[in-house]
Amino acid sequence: MSWELGLWLLALCALLALVVQLLRFLRADGDLTLMWAEWQGRRPEWELTDMVVWVTGASSGIGEELAYQLSTLGVSLVLSARRAQELERVKRRCLENGNLKEKDILVLPLDLADRSSHEAATKVVLQEFGKIDILVNNAGRSQRSLCVDTSLDVFKELIELNYLGTVSLTMCVLPHMIERKQGKIVTVNSLLGIISAPLSSGYSASKHALRGFFNCLRAELATCPGIVVSNICPGPVQSNIVKNSLTEEVQKTVGIDTVQSHKMVTSRCVRLMLISMANDLKEVWISDHPFLLITYLWQYMPTWAWWLTNKLGKKRIENFKNGLDADISYFKTWKTKHD
Ligand SMILES: NC(=O)c1ccc[n+]([C@@H]2O[C@H](COP(=O)([O-])OP(=O)(O)OC[C@H]3O[C@@H](n4cnc5c(N)ncnc54)[C@H](OP(=O)(O)O)[C@@H]3O)[C@@H](O)[C@H]2O)c1
């Protein structure tokens, strides 16, 4: 074979690889490493059994669905959030649908913003189950208000809850994991912990802070390779997050249900979360396009991303001012994907 033919073959292979990657990307609803793990990686059904998993924010949305999916895997569950009644409802459904018995599920009401209660709560879990294999830092609230209209108290509240609350609980669980030299700290961050968008300045700041914290923690735990620190970054997912979002004032939430059919269904997001946990992925992005594409641009081509975010940001603000979900439609073709 002449060297020219060899070169042509090499170029053809490179082109083919590029086309395959492009097709994978267009079909993806998560970053390409996560998509690979879903196809070829370890299954949650093999990896996550017999574990003690503590889920915060388990009374609604992503945390609630996570409890249901975990309950079918044979784990022991600790369900935390502020509303005990809602947690009891989730527990009952876990027992109805899953493989668990009453003794396998502990309902542990917890206010993440009340940091003084975290140490005692951790002790209760350890007394009940003797270990914590996975801490899922999921509880959190979002924001829908323009920066200029927003009281400083809202920024403070978001940092207290999303950032300091999560850090505080992690710090209580961490010594136990270090002692056992194993464990997973899984934090439900957001694409807004990587990119930024109008109406979410305080939320985005709190999630950027979390990402910075956990990336540092992972590096500090390099001598303890049995402890895995994972950042899960979803895009828009069906839940009560928008309804519960803070607005210009701390006491004022969005309060109304908006149409959610354009968002990823909660069960799909949670399935991908379980795959990332089973495969110890350090950071995953879970989202449909265009949010996934925009996140890749923020990561690899920020100048283009800033330009595009300014364009789409106008639509986001317009949607919000019209009483719609801020992300309801940027491009009509994406709108009905999950209808
Ligand atoms: N849905 C999305 O589009 C999306 C996208 C990216 C990231 N996320 C992240 O996903 C996580 C879960 O949100 P979600 O979408 O499932 O929203 P959600 O349906 O509103 O659920 C939020 C959960 O957090 C709990 N929570 C709120 N404040 C709390 C506090 N002070 N102490 C303890 N628990 C508290 C809530 O329970 P109580 O009210 O009973 O306390 C609830 O269980 C959040 O961290 C959010 O930032 C969501």
Image (tube, rainbow, N blue to C red):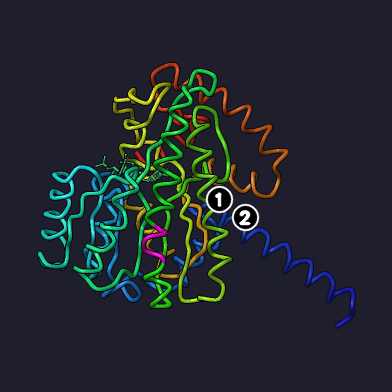
Amino acid type, residue under disc 2 in the picture: Leu
Q: Does the residue labelled 1 lie within 8 Å of ligand 1?
A: no
Q: Nearer the viewer, residue 151 or 269?
A: 151
Residue at the (73%, 66%) spot, across then down: 14
Horizontally, is 49 left or right of 85 in the view?
right
* Residue 22: image tag: 2
Residue at (16% x, 46% y) in the render: 84
Name the residue tied to disc 1.
26
Which residue does the image show at 26% across and 64% down from the upper left?
Answer: 123
Tell me the element at label 2: helix
Point out the stretch of residues depicted in magenta: 170-174
Compared with 11, 85 (above or below) is: above
Residue 181 is left or right of residue 251, and the answer is right
Q: Position of residue 291 (x, y in %)?
A: 53, 42
The image quadrant of residue 7 is bottom right
Q: Distance between the residues labelled 1 and 2?
A: 6 Å
- The answer to which of 191 and 332 lies nearer the viewer is 191
